[in-house]
Image (cartoon, grey):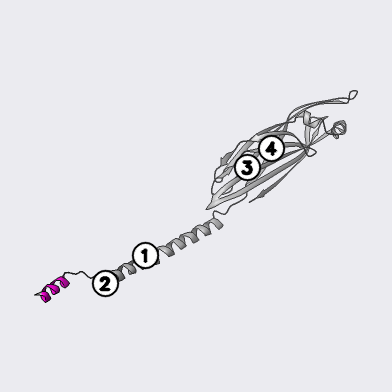
């Protein structure tokens, strides 16, 4: 009787040793499919990032610099100078990338012989993929910063006032990861005081990724 009952119990046991190889085989197949797929996607995104979506430098251009206001007089007897200068500048920044460019707050500086004599803010913004941003900038010369220069009187008597504008724009482009870009624009110009005109204007552009 005991032998028969034990045989009946053995018949009711479900073997599990045959299921384990099937589970391991299924996991192995999934890994063989998923891992190469992930590697292929990573390779594809890397190739796109280095070719089609490769980061490019923003293109800055100073379209125009106009003399908006010029009040100038010299009191020779008292060795005093009265000067008021306003410049209107139109700058365009083109984003040649396939993704948007975000830039932070910046400032345009007006310089006289390396001394900052005026400034204007550039608020933060975004330039869409392939778009061009136009910036209208007004620079007003701060006479109190200018009058302390030892070269001012001789420049004014000669009839030519040398000035320089300097603009730096810093931003990021996101292609898989953030890429930092910076553009620098420097324009040297002379103001012909006798004719109230801008002369010898020359701009230089540089950019870094």
Question: In this figure, which residue is indicated by the disc labeled 1?
Answer: 30
For this view, does 89 lie left or right of residue 4? right
Q: Residue furthest right?
A: 77
Q: Nearer the viewer, mark 4 or mark 3?
A: 4
Alpha carbon separation for disc pair 4 and 1: 58 Å
Instruction: Determine which of the numbered discs, if any, sits on residue 18 in the image.
Output: 2
Q: What is the distance, in whole Å, between disc 2 and disc 4 at their CAs? A: 76 Å
Q: Is residue 142 visible?
A: yes
Residue 12: mark: none
Secondary element at tag 2: loop
Q: Earlier in the sequence, mark 2 or mark 4?
A: 2
Q: Earlier in the sequence, mark 4 or mark 3?
A: 3
Q: Nearer the viewer, mark 4 or mark 1?
A: 1
At a point 16% along the width and 69% down the height, the residue shown is: 12
SS at mark 1? helix
Quarter of the image for residue 103 reads: top right
Q: Which mark is residue 93?
A: 3
Report the residue marked by disc 4.
Answer: 108
Q: Position of residue 6 (x, y in %)?
A: 14, 73
Residue density around tag 2, few if under 14, some if 14–19, many if 20 or more, within 10 Å? few
State which region is magenta.
2-15
Q: 10 Å neighbourhood of mark 4: few (<14), some, or many (≥20)?
A: many
Q: Answer with mark 2 or mark 1, whichever residue precedes in sequence.
A: 2
Question: Would you say 117 lies left or right of 155 here?
Answer: left
Q: Is residue 27 above or below residue 99?
A: below
Q: Position of residue 206 (x, y in %)?
A: 69, 48
Tell me the crowding category of disc 3: few under 14, some 14 to 19, or many 20 or more residues within 10 angstroms, Cα based.
Answer: some
Name the image quarter holding residue 117: top right
- Secondary structure beneath dot 4 equals strand
Estimate the spatial distance between the alpha carbons at disc 4 and disc 3, rounded to whole Å: 14 Å
């Amino acid at each position: 009787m005991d032998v028969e009952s034990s045989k009946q119990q053995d018949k009711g046991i479900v073997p599990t040793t045959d299921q384990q190889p099937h589970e391991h085989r299924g996991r192995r197949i999934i890994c063989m499919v998923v891992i190469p797929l992930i590697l292929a996607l990573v390779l594809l995104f890397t190739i796109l990032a280095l070719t089609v979506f490769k980061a490019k430098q923003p293109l800055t251009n100073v379209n125009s610099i106009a003399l908006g206001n010029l009040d100038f007089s010299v009191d020779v007897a008292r060795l005093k100078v009265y000067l008021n200068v306003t410049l209107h500048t139109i700058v365009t920044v083109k984003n040649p990338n396939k993704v948007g460019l975000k830039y932070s707050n910046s400032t345009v500086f007006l310089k006289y012989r390396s001394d900052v004599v005026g400034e204007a803010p550039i608020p933060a913004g975004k330039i869409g993929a392939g778009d061009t941003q136009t910036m209208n900038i007004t620079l007003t010369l701060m006479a109190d910063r200018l009058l302390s220069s030892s070269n001012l009187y001789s420049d004014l008597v000669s009839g030519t006032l040398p000035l320089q504008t300097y603009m730096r724009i810093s931003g990021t482009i996101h292609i898989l990861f953030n890429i930092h870009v910076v553009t620098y624009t420097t324009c040297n110009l002379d103001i012909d005081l006798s004719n109230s005109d801008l002369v010898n204007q020359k701009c230089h552009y540089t950019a870094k990724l």
